[in-house]
Image (cartoon, helix red, strand yellow):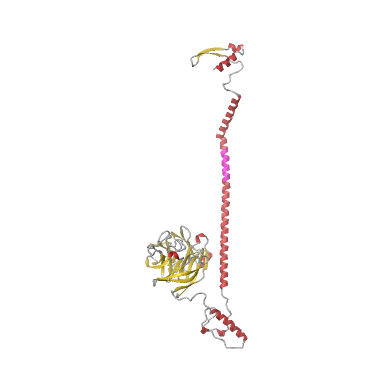
Amino acid sequence: MWFLATLCVSCLLMGTQAQSRASFRRSNDRNGRCQYSFTVDSPTEASCPSPGSSPEMDSLKSRLGLLEALVTRLAGGEAVSEFSQSSGSQSGIQDAYNQAMEEKAQLQREKQRLDRQVQDLQRRMEELRQEAERLRNKPCTPQPPPRGLINDNGFRPGSGPAPSHLISIPEKTEDRSLGTRYQELTAVVTEISAPNLDGPADITGCGDLVWVGEPEIHRKADSIAGKYGVWMQDPEAKDPYGSEMVWRIDAVGSDVRQLIGYENMDQLTRGFPTKVLLLPEGMESTGATMYDGSLYYQRRLSRTLIRYDLLSENIAARRDLPHAGFHGQFPYSWGGYTDIDLAVDENGLWAIYSTNKAKGAIVISQLDPHSLEVKGTWETKIRKTTVANTFMICGKLYTIASYTSPNTTVNYMYDTATSQGKAISVPFKNRYRYNSMVDYNPVHRKLYAWDNYYIVSYKVRLGKQE
């Protein structure tokens, strides 16, 4: 107020015209003191400057105005423009990402194609190796000896040991060419009279296992799921599948259900399946078998046995195997939850397992193939976890000592007919050093095995154990 009065007084003193328009006012302030106020119009200024006004203040107000205008623009149309630019940038990033993913998918497809080519080349190399091995082992046909030295019953070199009564000695002669021919014949007869390298002769019907041949390769699994598995042929095949039908199951995985069928062994080797079935319940390990038109297997995580009918493609029977250990209680030495192993031989369907009562010793039960009821049970004295695998031939249980040793033995036999067991030693080869399945086929008289991705078979001979 004092500043206003002073300013007005100054204005009053500036001219006579201002003096004529002066006014006087007297009043008390808020403290009750008397104040005199003089008011004079300025001769030059339309209005007095506001208190505190200065060029700096005006500049600041101008800046604030500009800032307010900028904020208004950003909140309005220009904000939309910025958002559009941001959206366009994000769209470009998304397009680049989609293109990268497409290139990645294309590279993965190319890798899969190259992997298939590598597998085909490996398969072809294996076929060529087998063919070379077959040709190398193929015996040369010897030149026929003089007719006078061949008996009328048709014996020829290479057909087996020549009985003494079939070999006649030529008459003495001075003919050097005949003497030379006699020496050649003597060499041939000496060669074929050597011990039979293919093992003892077969005995009609059943006998003891006395010899196991070299593994014959049929196919290598395509993926890690086939590191171990089970393959089989039905010895009592039913329509619509013939006796030549081959079945396989890759057993690596948490939910094993796929049963793959091949028309014959040649189609298995070529990798051309003709049937794929999906089992209604998962399978445990490599203990499955095929018999009388049905697949028999252990249901996953249980002691339940299942009969799956191939014709109806449905479960035909199920039954718990009494007291049987399962899921790692009494497996073979290689593990794999091989607690229950189903097998087939000339006498029918068998289960090989163990129980707490048997304290881990191998128990053998013969099963009814229709209802899965136990028909008879035998308890052995060999612990299941100490053997690599087992199989049945003619009602006799045989055990294999190792699943990794390239040269191991069939080391134990138990005869269910006499309830007696004994140690034996029949050479057996694990060529690929991880044999996870061995089963016997009574029609083809062979052992079927799955050795570290490889599907193989062994010829066997039965005779009399010494």
Q: Where in the figure is residue 449, as x and y percent of width and height?
A: 48, 66
Side of 223 relative to 15 (left or right):
left
The mark tally for this picture is 0
Please tell me which residue is depicted at 57% across the width and 39% down the height of the picture: 84
Q: Residue at x 47, y 71 (%)?
A: 425
Q: Is residue 43 above or below residue 395?
A: above
Q: Is residue 78 left or right of residue 301?
A: right
Q: Quadrant location of the C terminus?
A: bottom left
89 is within the stretch colored magenta: yes
Res 219 visible: yes
Residue 340 in percent (x, y) is at 42, 63
In the image, residue 197 lies in the stretch drawn in magenta: no
In this orientation, which residue lies closer to the viewer: 198 or 91?
198
Using the image as rendered, state which of residue 44 and residue 458 is in the foreground: 458
Q: Which residues are magenta?
A: 82-93
Closer to the camera in the image, 401 or 251: 401
Q: Measuring 56% from the left and 67% from the top, which residue is drawn there? A: 127
Q: Name the image quarter holding the N terminus.
A: top right
Would residue 311 be seen by someone viewing this image from the given angle?
no
Residue 163, image x, y percentages: 51, 82
Report the side of 453 relative to 299 (left or right). right
Magenta stretch: helix, strand or loop mostly: helix
Q: Position of residue 447 (x, y in %)?
A: 48, 69
Picture layout, residue 141 above or below residue 123: below
- Residue at 50 percent across and 60 percent down: it is 225
Camera-side residue of 75 and 38: 38
